[in-house]
Each structure stands twice: as C-alpha cells, then as structure tokens.
Image: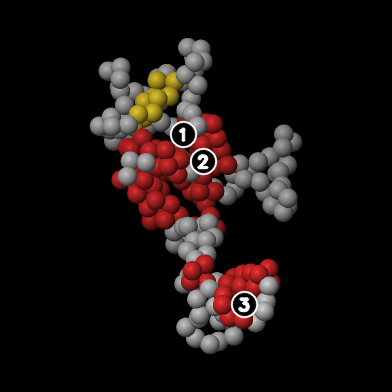
Amino acid sequence: MSHIDASFTFLSRIEEIELNIADKRWQSALALALTLPDICGGIAFPEIVKKYRDGRIMLDRQKRPTRDVGGQYIRWFDSFAAPYFKLDEADEKPYICGERCWQLRCEYLHQNKGFNNEDDIDSVRFHLGVNCGCSVCDSGGEKPDADLLDIRIDIEQFCLRMCKAAKSYYNSSHTEKDFDIYNTPVLDFTLAVQPARNTDETSIPAAENAEQKGENSAGTGKTLWQKIFKRM
C-alpha cells in the first residue's frame, strides 16, 4: 500500500464499529454493523446472482452478472454469523436470522426505522434497545425466539457479535478470498502534495512547485491524480 493510500478496508470498518460502540454512538455503530454481511456475502457467494423468470442471468451495465445482494446477505448470515446470535450455544436457532437481519438492514439504513410495529398480529415486531445488559432486550419476561412475534435486540451486543462473526470469517478466508475488492479508495492529500523522498520519475511534485510552473488548477489536479494512481 502506498504511503498516500488511506483506503477504508474491511478491517478498518470493523475497527470503526468498535470505536463507535466505545463512544456509545449507537446509530453509527448499527449502520456500519448491518453492512458487514453485505461485504462478506459478496465475497463468500459471488455465484448468487439475479436471474430473470426464464432463468437467464441478469447483467449490469458492464455486462457482468448482477449481484443478488439480499440472497448473498441472508446466506452469509445464516452460514457464518448465526452461531454468534444464539442466547445459548445449545440453542437450535439464533434469536435473529438472516432474513430478519436483511429486513432490518434495509429499513434502518434507508428509512431510519426497524420493522413496522403497527401491522396486524401476524407481522414480526422488532424492537431495538440500549443498556439492556444482555444480548436480547426482554421487556416481557419471555425468552425471545426467531419464531416469536417480538424480537428485541440490544444494539451494543448486536454490533459486537456481528464484528466477531465478520472477524472470524475474515481470519478463516482472507488467504483464499479477495477482501480488497470491497475497499473504499481514499487518498491522503496531505501526503500526496508533499515532495517525494526520492527523485524518480514517478515522484509527485509539491503543490507550490506546480504553481510556480504556471499550471492552472485544473491541469495540476489532473496531473496529480494521474501520478497518485500511477504510484498506487
């Protein structure tokens, strides 16, 4: 990695979730935690793609198979994260399954809400809580289960468990899977405009040197970006 590459990696996302938890920034922690199965699902199950009713694979604008993000998300959670979401190791089912986690992800990230608790009696009612002191916020005295109508989740425990699941998957798969494909490219512009330590042809000139040469801002920016990516 170049000294100017400050990209957000998979592990740095997990680290930021943990920092948000420590600072009790629950909204940020939950939002980032709910995206981990997005990343892991795409890495673990690239073969799960969208198809038309006649079975043909749906292609994107680059003529590549279109990810079935929901299918990948649910499969990864149920395959790799579910054991971390059991109240007891002996439990047959986790207290939240991949399908419910996907629903929470979509409604929380895009609508700033959990499940619609005003629906009829057959709907799942989902409750988020803080400072519950346990994995599941239980206000009714009954042991929650994935089959019951009410699912009560402690945000801190949910995020911590999701981080553990993601770390475990990374540790077991990073030598075989390419986690870099879902990095967020970020450049450190402070370092990018500093004089390079050597004088080879790919050295990036300081911003003031470009100005002294009379280059306009647009041209300088384009040249700088070209050299940055050449070094990366």
- Residue nearer the viewer, 79 or 81: 81
Identify which residue is drawn at 74% across, 36% down: 54
Q: Amino acid at mark 1?
A: Cys
Q: Which residue is mark 3?
A: 211
Q: Amino acid at mark 3?
A: Glu
- Residue nearer the viewer, 217 or 139: 217
**Quarter of the figure that contains the C terminus:** bottom right
- Residue nearer the viewer, 230 or 189: 189
* 3D distance between C-alphas at marks 3 and 2: 49 Å
Give the vertical position of 226 relative to 59 (above or below).
below
**What is the total number of numbered labels drawn onto the structure image?**
3
Give the vertical position of 214 relative to 60 (above or below).
below
Q: Amino acid at mark 2?
A: Tyr
Task: Give percent across and percent down for residue 187.
Answer: 52, 64
Q: Which residue is mark 1?
A: 101
Q: Which residue is mark 2?
A: 73
Find numbered disc 3 in the image and state the secondary structure of the residue it sits on: helix
